[in-house]
Image (cartoon, grey):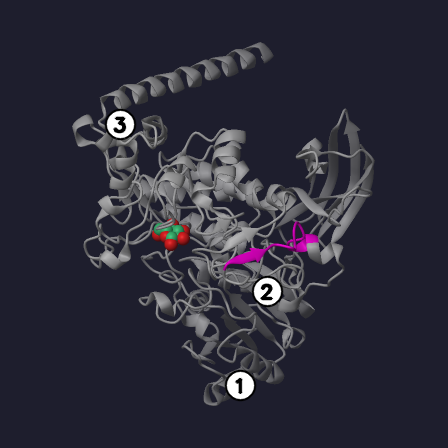
Amino acid sequence: MLKNLILSSYLVIIFVTAHAQQTNSKVEQLLKKMTLEEKIGMIHANSSFTSAGVPRLGIPELTTSDGPHGVRPEHGRDWTLDNNGKDFSTYLPVGITLASTWNPKLGYSFGSVLGSEAAYRGKDVILGPGINIMRTPLNGRNFEYLSEDPYLISKMAVGYIKGVQDQGVSACVKHFIANNQEKYRSGINVEMSERALREIYLPGFKAAVADGDVNTVMGAYNKFRGEFCTYNDYLVNQILKGEWNFKGVVMSDWGAIHTTKDALLGGADLEMGSDLRMLPNPDYNKFFFADAALKMVKSGEVAESVIDDKVRRILTVMYKTHMFAKRKPGNLNSAEHVAIAKKVAEEGIILLQNKDAILPFNKNKIKSIAVIGANANRENAMGGGSSQVRAPYEITPLKGLQNIVGNKIKIRYEQGYTVARNAEANTEMIKNAVEAARTSDVVILVGGWTHGFDYSVWEDNAFDAEGKDKESMNLPFGQDELIKAVAEVNRNTVVVLYGGGPADLTSWVNQVKGVIQAGYPGQEGGNALAEIIFGDVNPSGKLTVTFPRKLADVPAHKLGEYPGDSINVHYNDDIFVGYRYYDTYKVEPLFPFGHGLSYTKFEYSNLSVINDNGVVKIKLLIKNIGDKAGAEVVQLYVKDEKSSVKRPEKELKGFEKISLPSGESKTVVFDLKKDAFSFYDENKKQWVLESGSFDIMVGSSSKDIRVRKAVQL
Ligand code: BGC
């Protein structure tokens, strides 16, 4: 048996190596046949989302598309939105909601939907996942990203990437690196310590390369230590292509290259974007990687081998994704894709607060519901910027609730507030909402963030939006006043928050019984939400980002700088991002990282921790002691009890989501290797494990540790 296994693994290695060698020689043969002009044509955009091929040699164009949670509507070669209605695709939950499932297998399914739909729509590269660290709640693109924690990001991103690439389409992990704010994104220089870089900002990208085998990486708009990220010699040549041996393509964000020679030598392979000022006829020959590059190679200022390396990478990715052969046709909005979108929403919506077990609502007892809030009746798919999706339909919360209650329960809807620029509390609307709340058994108030006002106008994307950050953590449009007034007359109020992360909830959170964080749960989101509210689905999502009490508590704002002085921003918060800060500096969050409630209860017991020759083997028993089936995210944190450098109070080093019927138990095991206990030593310039005692903590959130034991290393 073992012999067979060894033999078959050996054969797989031989096959993979032989295949890679074949690809290499095909690439080299093509390269030899190409003129310099043809090579140059392949390293810069030739339309809004494509770069040129070489028809005479059968090399196709490379076609990219956003984005992270659905294939973007067609913008044509000239950025003219195609309005023939045939460019729809499945609107999946956004990144933050996907990550809230804490289920890498769902990450894979999610990626496979994207890959399949991209293939169907004729795309070669999907511009996702977006994995920048959530450093401040104000970042306008947090909704597209995954978490404040690099370990969780790594696990979710790898699943996503493999899902996309197994469909024969490339994923593109972005934005490499430190695009942690939209404000000043196109030029701000980020300064951080080497330790913060290694421990917080790089691991997700490293996992994407080392474990996900991602085909392409998108450089960030911003600078890092004085040089633009896309051609930052240290980041791209030394770390990404050097230390990590990345063999794929580094493409620029759209318009992120600003020079020729440094960018060619700094490791950028493909210049993307369009000079929008030149629309409708951008001259792509004026690109930095076009005529200017050609001239430099011809004059000998830049060696042709530099260009060859870039073309070699592009061709290799083309072979890897079968662009020269017949590809899988893919599928669009199939029943299976819709089911995956729904499943991600079911597992990604988070129950944050459930006083007096107000949820789930009982269909047989409740006679009337007041549904309040503009977000209850608002579609989101086309908002947010480049990640927009034209959904075939979108189930809003109101529709989802109507679907589930039919005519059994009376629903009265009141908008409560207006989504409009500078809109403030509206007395008349609040009065109507209060009246609905007063005359109904329960209230579901759906508010939170929106992408913006009018999605057809880029500048109107205001909150969860590309190119802009939120101005504060306070909910807009007078929502605090509305919620307080409603809760005053009906204590059975559940607030559902849409949006890409935390808001300041402190002025009303104690007055309402339920709070649900829905993120942006995609085209099936309203159905999933309604099923959670009525208990047909038991919630199992967990926060991937801390909900602080107030903005002033956030480490980026308290210890570090945000947004910087428009030229530089210093990350003096260092490695103390998210719960690493709140725990270590004893700042009480409103809802901690990893938090999320269920309608059942889980018991943690029998923890055993053994150091087996440097591998720490952890085993424990989880039992569902409630009366409903449910899923729990078992979270494993590690603390170094004594260290020569300041280390966080705890760090996530493992998690597993398990489903258990009522009354049943399951053993969960984790194996932790040396890297789980190490820190990045700036003097030694390497990861270091200092022997001594480490705490192993396992729990239901970062604050709800149920069992712990020390281990000597
Ligand atoms: C965004 C990228 C996106 C690209 C193409 C840029 O503005 O930052 O995330 O993939 O546009 O739409």
Q: Secondary structure at mark 3?
A: loop
Residue drawn 47% across and 72% down? 408
The type of residue carrying mark 2 is: Pro
Q: CA distance from mark 3 to mark 1?
A: 62 Å
Image quarter where the C terminus lies is top right
Residue drawn 38% across and 49% down? 256
Residue drawn 46% across and 63% down? 464
| Residue closest to the eye, 302 or 225 | 302
Give the numbered dot on residue 360.
2
Asked whether residue 211 is in view, the answer is no
Binning the other alpha carbons within 10 Å of mark 1 as few (below 14), some (14 to 19) or many (20 upward) gives many
Q: Earlier in the sequence, mark 3 or mark 1?
A: 3
Identify whether 601 is placed above or below 617. below
Q: Secondary structure at mark 1?
A: helix
Q: Earlier in the sequence, mark 2 or mark 1?
A: 2
- Find out whether residue 568 is within the magenta segment: yes
Q: Are marks 3 and 1 in contact (CB under 8 Å)?
A: no
Image quarter where the N terminus lies is top right
Residue 120, horizontal then vertical, whole percent:
28, 42
Q: Are marks 2 and 1 in contact (CB under 8 Å)?
A: no
Identify whether 300 is placed above or below 602. above
Per the image, the residue denoted by label 1 is 434
Query: Which stretch appears magenta?
Result: 567-580
